[in-house]
């Protein structure tokens, strides 16, 4: 790794994900350092800046962090509602951006961000759909892409969180959690999602009052496949993300790794990660490493603003389907030539 001219990064939003990315930039990967951080909570910004290397400045204004000495790229980890303004500010400065999902909470805002990037004339934005960097997801991608098992017909997914945070809403099952399966399915199958149906069983007694948890989300795809996702954000026992592809001549399943397997007292068992920070630790590391390497080489290789838009369009249909209980077609704009070919990255 070339350690000359390391990339100075401004991290916007220093909550759970932002602080973890700061740690990762400074201690896990090479070729980059945290030049500045910003958070509306000044104390939080200062606290996290204090964990970074010397010279990292703390700000409450994201634009001031982007203008700080040494900044050559931006990592956005603020809440989704703040992303549009921060993405536009980064594009105004022609800075490369890694933006945590969602790109924006709604498709209209995503279109505005895409228009600004297109006006700039080159791609600058990557969306933090980190499952594309997970070892198991990449194995499944390879297997489906080489066609050895024939066409994929169905993808069965399970997405379980131990417990949801107090502000989690029923809509967030779709646009905060299942948004990952939307991108993963598009990427794995190399197809767009065209319609959504959401089925809701009686809510679990373990879910907070008013939260419709769990749900079953069914997607139809442009190639005639079906994708079903069980989303259960208060399952209580751990963080589980699994996917099984059913193809014409075989099936392939990921997400069963249990770490240490034990046999004792007439039982066998393994471990289940507690949350996404643990389960996807390697994926977050690889995502950041590949983004830094590509950025230093003047390239953008990961999920694009178009992918962020496509997910936002599917989320809008998903939330509508959740409310109506009926099959809802996805309304999606034409993909601009600027985003061709689509970033269904084939890994090596
Ligand atoms: N890829 C993944 O697996 C995950 C992604 N995320 C995404 O990461 C982002 C951050 O989520 P968390 O860290 O869990 O949230 P968090 O609530 O822990 O942290 C957000 C931070 O942003 C700050 N903030 C709020 N408004 C801001 C603004 N306008 N400008 C700057 N800072 C602002 C808050 O003070 C807080 O410190 C979200 O977009 C979320 O969807 C979250 C969890 C997992
Ligand atoms: O992005 C994430 C969270 O925001 C979301 O709330 C979780 O359900 C996901 O598993 C996690 O990856």
Image (cartoon, grey):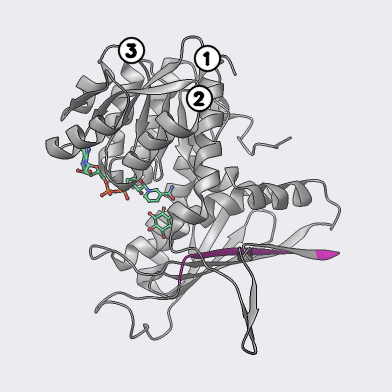
Observer-side mark, 2 or 3, equals 2
Q: What stretch is highlighted in magenta?
A: 238-250
Q: Distance between the residues labelled 2 and 3?
A: 16 Å
Residue for badge 2: 30
Spot occupied by residue 171 in the image (x, y as percentages of width and height): 33, 63
**Vertical placement of 210 versus 129: above or below?**
below
Quick check: marks 1 and 2 in contact, CB under 8 Å? yes
Location of the C terminus (image quadrant): top right
Q: Is residue 25 left or right of residue 254?
A: left
The answer to which of 40 and 4 lies nearer the viewer is: 4
Callout 1: SS: loop
Between discs 3 and 1, the one toward the N terminus: 1
Q: Residue 19: within the magenta?
A: no
Spot occupied by residue 198 in the image (x, y as percentages of width and height): 46, 71
Residue projecting furthest to the front:
265
Q: Which residue is drawn at 46% across and 37% down?
A: 127
Q: Which residue is drawn at 60% across and 54% down?
A: 185
Residue for badge 3: 70
**Vertical placement of 258 versus 19: above or below?**
below
Ligand 2 - quadrant of the structure image: bottom left
Quadrant in which residue 267 is drawn: bottom right
Quadrant in which residue 173 is drawn: bottom left
Residue for badge 1: 3
Residue 332 visible to the viewer: no
């Amino acid at each position: 790794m070339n350690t000359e001219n390391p990339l100075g990064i401004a991290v916007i939003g220093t909550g759970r994900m932002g602080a973890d990315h700061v740690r990762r930039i400074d201690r896990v990967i090479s070729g980059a350092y945290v030049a500045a951080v910003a958070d509306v909570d000044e104390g939080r910004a200062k606290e996290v800046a204090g964990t970074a290397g010397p010279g990292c400045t703390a700000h409450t204004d994201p634009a001031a962090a982007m203008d700080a000495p040494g900044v050559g790229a931006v990592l956005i980890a603020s809440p989704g509602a703040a992303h549009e303004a921060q993405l536009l500010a980064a594009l105004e400065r022609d800075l490369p951006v890694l933006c945590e999902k969602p790109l924006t909470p709604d498709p209209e805002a995503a279109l505005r961000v895409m228009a600004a990037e297109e006006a700039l004339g080159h791609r600058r934005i990557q969306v933090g759909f980190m499952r594309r960097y997970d070892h198991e997801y990449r194995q499944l991608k390879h297997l489906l892409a080489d066609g050895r098992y024939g066409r994929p017909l169905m993808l069965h997914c399970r997405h379980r969180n131990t417990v949801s945070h107090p502000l989690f809403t029923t809509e967030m099952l779709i646009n905060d959690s299942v948004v990952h399966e939307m991108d993963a399915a598009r990427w794995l199958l190399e197809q767009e999602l065209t319609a959504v149906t959401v089925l809701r069983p009686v809510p679990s007694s373990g879910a907070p009052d008013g939260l419709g948890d769990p749900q079953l989300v069914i997607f139809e795809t442009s190639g005639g496949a079906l994708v079903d996702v069980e989303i259960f954000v208060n399952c209580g026992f751990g963080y589980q993300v699994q996917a099984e592809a059913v193809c014409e001549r075989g099936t392939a399943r990921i997400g069963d790794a249990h770490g240490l397997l034990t046999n004792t007292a007439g039982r066998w068992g393994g471990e289940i990660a507690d949350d996404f920070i643990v389960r996807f630790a390697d994926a977050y590391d690889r995502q950041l490493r590949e983004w830094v390497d590509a950025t230093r080489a003047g390239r953008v290789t990961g999920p694009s603003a178009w992918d962020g838009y496509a997910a936002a369009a599917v989320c809008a249909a998903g939330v509508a389907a959740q409310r109506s209980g009926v099959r809802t077609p996805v309304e999606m704009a034409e993909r601009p030539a600027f985003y061709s070919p689509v970033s269904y990255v084939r890994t090596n």
